[in-house]
Amino acid sequence: MSEATNTTYSVCTICDIGCQLRTEVADGKVKRVIAHDNPMLAGNICYKGIAAADIHNHADRLKVPLKRVGERGEDKWQEISYEQAMDEIAERLGKVVAEHGPEALAVSTSGWNTQSTHSTDRRFMNLLGSPNWISGVALCAGNTAAVNKLTYGWFPMPDWSSTNCIVLFGHNPRKHSWTPIFNSINAARNRGAKVIVLDPRVSDQAETADLHLRLRTGTDAAMCLGWLKVIFDEELYDKDFVASWCTGFEQLRQRVDEYPLERVEEITGVDRELIAEAARMYASANGAVIPWTPITDQQISSTSAIRLHSILRAVTGNLDVVGGETLGGFNPNYIPESEIGMHDALSDEQKAKQLGFDDHPVFTYRVAEKLKKETEKVWGYPYADLVMGCQMANPTNVFRAMANSDPYPIKAFFALGNNALMSYPNQHQVLKGMMNQDLIVAHEIFMTPTAMLADYVLPGDVFTERNHIADSWSWTTRLTLSQKAVEPPPEASSTYEFWHDLAHRMGFSEQFPWKTLDDILDYRLSRSGRTFEEFANTTIMEAPKPEFRKYKKRGFATPSGKVELYSSILKDLGFDPLPYHREGPAISDDYPYRVFTGVREDSFFQTGQRNIKVLRDRAPSPKLFLHPEDAARENVQDHDWVRLETAHGAVTAKILVQESMKSGHIRVPHGWWYPELRSSEHLAGAFISSDAVLCSDEEEFLDYEQGVPHFKGFPGRIVKIDTPQNLSEQTLNG
């Protein structure tokens, strides 16, 4: 007789938005994942969340630790016990540290996939002495947080419930991609809020926007400077706030005067009257927001564009107000990861060895140390790990060191919940770096291309198999319940268990006193006088009552205590303290298209889910989007196979002709590989269609201050090819 169905609350980690769902269990297995029973949350569910049972119960899921027995990347393995794997990993890591120093360990992770880590990875590395922690958030949201801190010391979150104007710089939330934000935008629109979209494409959001500015890709910073020109010239800024709480206004105004609307029109390709209309709509709204967007994270002027978003919020009076952008701070009832990470345990000498510290320092320890005193004064902790995006090493610098031992060797690389080979630019260099390692450890639920390169592959758990309290990585003050619904495979481990067990083998047992994942949850809740069990028995979600204009009591967590329109930190570091527009690499007769990569497809998150049938059936093959005029010029049509070439690399994909595309642009999906080709293609076809092979990470392609590559608008061309013979029928015919 079957057991009765049991239902628990879950926070989904298949993507990074963390929707609150429910998990149904029967006979000890996840039966299905369904919408929340709270009407406020019920609409926050997408294809990927519904597919959780297919993912968590998948026949190919890793369940036993594996040790490499063939050549690196040959995909030959021996099954071993978890204890043996951890003993050998600790021994081999110890040898690397003894020979090359603790900085020779680099770790790459993704917090949404490894929500059980609780910053114990940073704690372990800081105790060991390695500053070389990287994450995909270096290219997405985390770097935005770090740059926002330069302006006003925190990373704001829109007040979706009260805003009257929403500005989307290329971000395109949809029903099945960032679903809660999609629903929040729709709710605001239904209340009468205006929506402004800035996107080369006629995106889903652009179709229903009040204003759509089809700017040339990679020109976001110039557009923002144009908006400021209108706002300053027409005196639409908040004069009282600027006078009382901002520094550097006159210097900024001089810079803005270098961008009259005729120049901005020439740079962006948008009519100057439309630019002015959008600027007025934003500045005149009673509460307006510029939500985070991955687009400005990934441009050659990324630091300036992100700073300009923060400056627009401030000068229009939309900072920490109802309907604007809220500065949440830490939840006083939950010990933050910023404290657990033990950043003070890492010596100044080791912090200075962090890769990226000297040349691209904005999200490294170099800037964190400059903000340390003010961050503690305003927010209570000297280090703020906002969206995990602060105190990071620079990924490009890390992979160069792995490949070339410059400026020193990296010889041990751990990837947890992170398909690192395909998650950073210059995939060929990433591979070269991995092939040069003495030790690679992957902690995963499936055999990814990165895991195929490892010496040890440890099976991980999933969100239905552990208790958790999601705090949005300190981006908000909300705490959300996620309950363990089923047991993980016997040899699987959480990321907390991995770091705890490695720490005990490496001599750090006193600093890792919590025996289980539930123990550390109890510890993090201890300041509220509750255990996890008590939290779970009383609430599904809670947050302190919002407090606005907190800066009136504490100031801003910057060196001046004010919003720094002219950044004192950037000046101290030798960079331009004012924002600017910088042109990306120019197109040419040989490479006539502007390529923008990283566009997500609803069925997948990052490089994941290509092996999940119910999701792959929705998008069987990678498709490049091209405007009809460009398709006619190239003599291609829907479903033709082409090779997209840049000076740095090439990918193979199908063409999809789209009226919504901007002429002269090519859209490239992110993260494509072919799990079904594992037995026939090296690394399961990781180099056939992956956008990470296209973009260079040489200095001319990098944002100066962060070292972020220019993914949005680099030169490329397409060549029509015959149907590939090495791909599966599913891909060829999909």
Image (cartoon, rainbow, N blue to C red):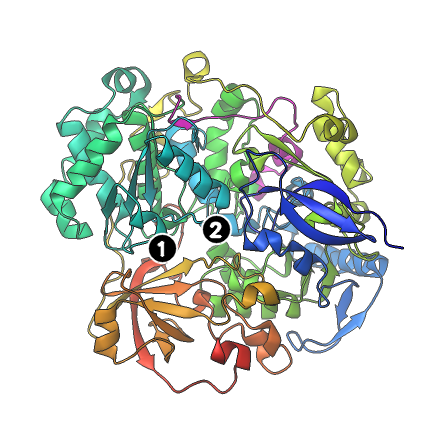
- State the CA–CA distance, disc 2 to disc 1: 28 Å
Indicate the position of residue 507 as horizontal and vertical percent values.
79, 44
* Residue 436 in view here: no
- Which residue bears the numbered disc 1? 702
Residue nearest the viewer, comparing 8 with 673: 8
Write down the quadrant of residue 556 in the picture: top left
Against 60, is 354 above or below?
above
Q: Which residues are magenta?
A: 321-350
- Left or right position of 251 against 9: left
- The extreme right residue here reads 1
Residue at 84% of width from left, 61% of height from top? 84
Compare marks 2 and 1 and give the one earlier in the sequence: 2
Residue nearest the viewer, comparing 572 with 565: 565
Q: Is residue 382 located in the magenta-colored stretch of the structure?
A: no
- The extreme front residue here reads 1
Q: Are marks 2 and 1 in contact (CB under 8 Å)?
A: no
Q: Amino acid at mark 1?
A: Leu
- Which residue bears the numbered disc 2? 177
Identify the element where label 1 is drawn.
loop
Write down the quadrant of residue 633 in the picture: bottom left
* Residue 447 in view here: yes
- The extreme left residue here reads 262
Dot 2 alpha-carbon crowd within 10 angstroms: few under 14, some 14 to 19, many 20 or more? many
Identify the image quadrant of the N terminus.
bottom right
Indicate the position of residue 45 as horizontal and vertical percent values.
56, 47
Identify the element where label 2 is drawn.
loop
Write down the quadrant of residue 545 in the picture: top right
Indicate the position of residue 658 as horizontal and vertical percent values.
30, 65
